[in-house]
Image (cartoon, grey):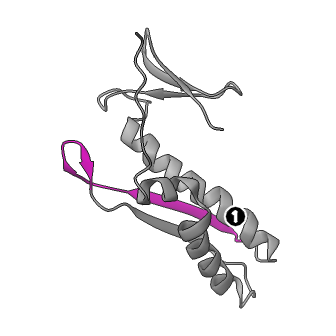
Amino acid sequence: MASVNVERTENGYVARNDRGAEVAMGGGDEQGVFTPVELLLAALGGCNIVTVEPLTAKRGHRLVRLAMTVHAEKVETTKLGPITVSYDIELPEGDEQAEEVFRAVAHRVEEKYCTVSHALRNETEVVLELPV
């Protein structure tokens, strides 16, 4: 089960999880906050990278650098175009198999194991519950 609380505050909006973490949000004009679309992209990137890293390391190929950029353009007011996930990696020196293992793991994670990717690809239903 995953759940967050999102509410308006004196300084904008904040999302909180039950472990006490907070993320400030806004409409895009404020400094130091994420927009909801940026949070969606961060969720996609985070889901992929926190799964790729341990699976690659578990196979004996810990990458020196592992980072990514997740990019999307709005093609309509309320619609994103294709989302691009671009990895930036540095392979361990002398490890001839690291790149092959990383590529295989990254593809498998994106296709099978990233819950956020799966939700976006399969248009997960959103149910709106309003107070009576």
Query: Badge 1: few (under 14), some or many (20 or more) residues near its Cα, within 10 Å?
Result: some
Q: Position of residue 73 (x, y in %)?
A: 27, 54
Q: Residue at x 79, y 77 (%)?
A: 59
Asked if the magenta segment contains residue 67, the reply would be yes
Q: Residue at x 68, y 25 (%)?
A: 18
- 9 horizontally vs 49: left or right: left
* Residue underneath mark 1: 53
Label 1 is placed on what type of residue?
Glu
In the displayed structure, would residue 131 be above or below residue 125?
A: above
Quadrant including the N terminus: top right
Q: Residue furthest front?
A: 132
Disc tally is 1
- 14 horizontally vs 62: left or right: left
Q: Position of residue 110 (x, y in %)?
A: 54, 67
Asked if the magenta segment contains residue 15, the reply would be no
Q: Residue at x 62, y 81 (%)?
A: 104
